[in-house]
Image: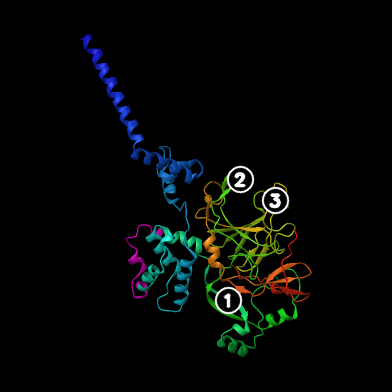
């Protein structure tokens, strides 16, 4: 009996070694790699307090209650967006949307882009105008987008992602335009109502006291208010001010630490008026070691955070602004400069004057700050928005700029606050002045 025990023990050891070897080989296989990576990535993108990877993978410890498990399941939101939609695709979709806004079938530009995003896997280097024309004609022919996309696995993802990026840019609004550009019906209505182009029904005290030149007085007195449907977002650089740029998203940066550039640089002259792209409220302003004088504006739906950095030394912001201020798309919010790359406030350490413009997407507040932030490439967006640049006027006494044509964006809670230069003092239009290149 004793003679048989050693062989059995040896067999048991060999069996255990075989099991361990098989498990090791599985981990080295592609299947093992996928399993390992999925746990690591889930832990990285979630980071929701103590829940860690468990919340991201849906696996909770035995100590979690059913209520906690249910809460973790409800905490599902988009964790990453790679926005590659081109200017050309946005322009075509936008044109379909605007051209059909009064038709029985109104094409939605974000839905059109989401369809192509799902079809291309987000890769708009494959974009062809004919592809959008086909889907637009199908919908105009009576088909429903929900029926067309019911078997497209990722359509809902692209619809939500592109909606978060572009959701505040197109819609109905009221705007002031010169009388010579107004349609006949608007002029007739103005004459019948005895209107002088003055605004009413909202506060017009936004901004410092100032005045307008005779030329600007004529423009102001001759303006007409019209209701429009179309692009209500603006380029971040004011009209008639030159700038140059290229797609620099993701390039290397080394100040402080090695990192990627998560924004878009628009090179221009110091003092160039910087414009609010979308209506929202000032969430952050002040000095930042990397961005210098910077301004952060949050959209009213909370999904977009617009970041404007390297603003002008000594005169970075429009003086009417403070944290919590409401701004309207097209308002002057600050001035281009070259501050930043220093712990010391008000320091010019940027070699070439430029505006660093960034767009952060926020699907959950845990993504606002930290490792979960989502910054998108906004180069193509700035190219698209170049069709709508705000005209500004300068107040000579204070060197402050104001928008020339007012607007009423209905998304602003309680109604908008005008940014109109007051009538006492002297001012010049931007065509008659050049930015101060000192500072």
Give the vertical position of 177 relative to 11 (above or below): below
Quadrant of the rendering where the N terminus is positioned = top left
Where residue 321 sits, quadrant-wise, is: bottom right
Point out the stretch of residues depicted in magenta.
138-156
| Cα distance between the residues tagged 3 and 1 | 41 Å
Question: Where is mark 1, residue-wise?
Answer: 174
Find disc 3 in the rendering and name its residue: 349
Foreground label between 2 and 1: 2
- Residue at disc 1, secondary structure: strand
Q: How far apart are marks 3 and 2 (CA)?
A: 14 Å
Q: Magenta stretch containing residue 42, yes or no?
A: no
Left or right for 370, reference 29: right
Q: Quadrant of residue 181?
A: bottom right
Is residue 206 something one can see in this rendering?
A: no
Report the mark closest to the observer, 3 or 1: 3
Residue ID for mark 2: 254
Give the CA distance from mark 2 to mark 1. Answer: 45 Å
Badge 3 density bin: few <14, some 14–19, many ≥20, Cα 10 Å: some
- In the rendered image, residue 196, in percent from the top left (x then y), is placed at 67, 85
Binning the other alpha carbons within 10 Å of mark 1 as few (below 14), some (14 to 19) or many (20 upward) gives some
Task: Identify the residue at the far top of this view.
Answer: 2
């Amino acid at each position: 009996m004793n003679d048989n025990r050693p062989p059995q023990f040896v067999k048991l050891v060999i069996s255990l070694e075989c099991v361990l070897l098989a498990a090791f080989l599985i981990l080295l296989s592609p299947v093992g790699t996928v399993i390992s990576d999925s746990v690591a990535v889930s832990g990285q993108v979630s980071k929701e307090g103590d829940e860690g990877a468990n919340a991201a993978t849906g696996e909770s410890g035995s100590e979690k209650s059913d209520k906690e498990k249910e809460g973790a399941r409800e905490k599902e939101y988009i964790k990453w967006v790679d926005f590659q939609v081109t200017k050309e695709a946005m322009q075509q979709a936008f044109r379909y949307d605007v051209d059909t806004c009064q038709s029985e079938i109104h094409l939605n530009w974000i839905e059109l882009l989401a369809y192509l995003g799902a079809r291309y896997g987000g890769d708009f280097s494959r974009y062809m105008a004919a592809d959008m024309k086909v889907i637009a004609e199908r919908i105009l022919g009576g088909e429903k987008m929900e029926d067309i996309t019911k078997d497209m696995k990722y359509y809902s993802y692209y619809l939500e992602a592109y909606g978060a990026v572009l959701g505040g840019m197109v819609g109905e609004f009221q705007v002031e335009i010169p009388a010579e550009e107004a349609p006949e019906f608007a002029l007739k209505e103005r004459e019948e109502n005895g209107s002088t182009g003055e605004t009413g029904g909202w506060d017009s005290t936004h901004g410092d006291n100032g005045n307008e030149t005779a030329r600007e007085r004529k423009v102001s007195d001759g303006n007409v208010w019209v209701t429009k449907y179309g692009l209500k977002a603006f380029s971040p650089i004011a009209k008639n001010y030159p700038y140059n740029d290229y797609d620099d998203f993701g390039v290397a940066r080394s100040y402080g630490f090695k990192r990627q550039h998560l924004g878009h640089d628009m090179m221009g002259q110091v003092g160039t008026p910087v414009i609010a792209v979308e209506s929202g409220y000032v969430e952050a302003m002040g000095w930042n070691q990397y961005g210098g004088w910077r301004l952060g504006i949050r959209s009213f739906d909370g999904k977009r955070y617009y970041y404007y950095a390297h603003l002008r030394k000594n005169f970075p912001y429009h003086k009417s602004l403070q944290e919590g201020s409401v701004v309207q798309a097209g308002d002057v919010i600050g001035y281009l400069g070259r501050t930043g790359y220093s712990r010391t406030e008000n320091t010019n350490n940027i070699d070439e004057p430029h505006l660093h413009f960034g767009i952060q997407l926020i699907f959950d507040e845990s993504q606002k700050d930290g490792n979960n932030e989502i910054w998108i490439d906004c180069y193509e967006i700035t190219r698209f928005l170049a069709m709508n640049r705000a005209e500004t006027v300068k107040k000579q006494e204070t060197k402050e700029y104001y928008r020339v044509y007012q607007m009423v964006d209905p998304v602003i809670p309680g109604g908008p606050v005008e940014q109109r230069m007051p009538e006492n003092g002297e001012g010049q239009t931007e065509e008659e002045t050049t930015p101060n290149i000192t500072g």
